[in-house]
Image (cartoon, grey):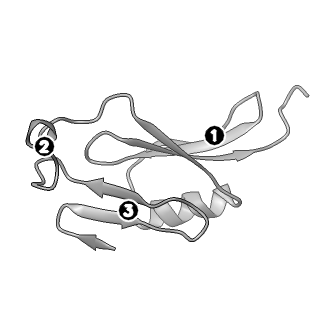
Amino acid sequence: MAADGFASLVREDTPDAILLRRGTEVLPEGFRDQPAAGVVIAFTVDDLDAEYERLKNEGAPVTMPLREEPWGERLFQITDPNGVVFQFVAWVTPEHA
């Protein structure tokens, strides 16, 4: 669901995530104009490549392209307009296992 300044991400198998644009009156007055700093929300997904393509095709701002870490984590990140980083992860066999 989405409206001006609001988006709700919902899936049956995960908790809901609500995103609000800075300045939105729903936020407490002292927080309305503060950007997020250091917030990363990670989701483990079954098909990381498909999720990457889906979000990229929908215009999500990919701020870290798909990559694989030596410890077995494949991931990519998008960042919302408030600075919240969403990381999507799939676990694979590490390169040096």
Numbered mark located on residue 94 in the image: none
Instruction: Report whether 59 appears left or right of 5.
Output: right
Three-letter code for the amino acid on which mark 3 is drawn: Gly
Secondary structure beneath disc 1? Answer: strand
Residue drawn at 15 percent across, 55 percent down: 26
> In this orientation, which residue lies closer to the viewer: 73 or 21?
21
Instruction: Read off the residue under disc 2.
Output: 32
Looking at marks 3 and 2 on the same chain, the residue that comes earlier in the sequence is marked by 2
Looking at marks 2 and 1 on the same chain, the residue that comes earlier in the sequence is marked by 2
Three-letter code for the amino acid on which mark 1 is drawn: Arg
Instruction: Report whether 85 appears left or right of 49.
Output: left
Which one is closest to the eye, mark 2 or mark 1? 2
Q: CA distance from mark 3 to mark 2?
A: 25 Å
Q: Residue furthest right?
A: 97
Secondary structure beneath disc 2? Answer: loop
Three-letter code for the amino acid on which mark 2 is drawn: Arg
Q: CA distance from mark 2 to mark 1?
A: 34 Å
Secondary structure beneath disc 3? Answer: loop
Q: Badge 1: how crowded within 10 Å, few (<14), some, or many (20+)?
A: few
Instruction: Read off the residue under disc 1.
Output: 67
Instruction: Read off the residue under disc 3.
Output: 59
On the image, the x and y values in percent for residue 14 come to 57, 61
Looking at marks 1 and 3 on the same chain, the residue that comes earlier in the sequence is marked by 3
Residue 1 sits in quarter: bottom left
Q: Residue furthest front?
A: 28
Vertical side of 31 occupied by 55: above or below: below
Q: CA distance from mark 1 to mark 3?
A: 19 Å
On the image, the x and y values in percent for residue 84 come to 36, 41
